[in-house]
Image (tube, grey):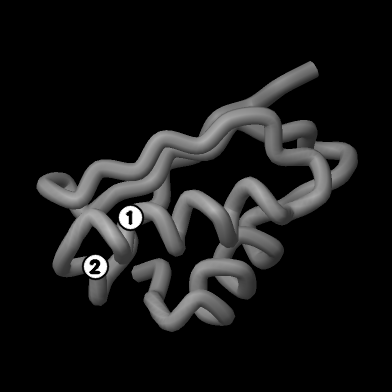
Amino acid sequence: MSEHVTLNVTGMSCNHCVMRVEKALKGVLGVSEVAVSLEAGQATVGYDPAKAALDDFKAAVADAGYEVV
């Protein structure tokens, strides 16, 4: 079963930032899809809730140098 969550991400200013956030989120175990919008400052994540949680996404984004607010 898959769920989706939309995260508000601060600190992104270019397409390189978008790619870093996408890569970080795709690296979280249980994530099946990621869509990041620079204009909206958001990342939508499809994931298996048995394997991943919001704190995992926040930590991955923080490790990439950005923040989930």
Determine crowd level at label 1: few under 14, some 14-19, many 20+ residues with C-alpha closer than 10 A.
Answer: many
SS class, disc 1 = helix
Is 13 left or right of 43, judged from the image as shown? left
Query: To which residue does mark 2 refer?
Result: 12
Query: Label 1: which residue?
Result: 18
> Residue at position x 80%, y 17% from top?
1
- Locate residue 13 relative to residue 64 in the image: left or right: left
Q: Is residue 35 above or below residue 20?
A: above
Q: CA distance from mark 2 to mark 1?
A: 7 Å
Outermost left residue: 39
Tell me the kind of residue under disc 1. Val
**Mark 2 touches mark 1? (CB < 8 Å):** yes
In the picture, residue 12 is in which quadrant? bottom left
The residue lying at 35 percent from left, 69 percent from top is: 69
Task: Return the residue nearer the eye: 69 or 15.
Answer: 15
Farthest residue, direction right: 50
Instruction: Name the secondary structure under disc 2.
Output: loop
- Please provide percent x and percent y for residue 17: 31, 64
Q: In the rendered image, which quarter is residue 4 located in?
A: top right
Quarter assignment of residue 8: bottom left
User: Residue placed at 64% from the left, 26% from the top?
Assistant: 3
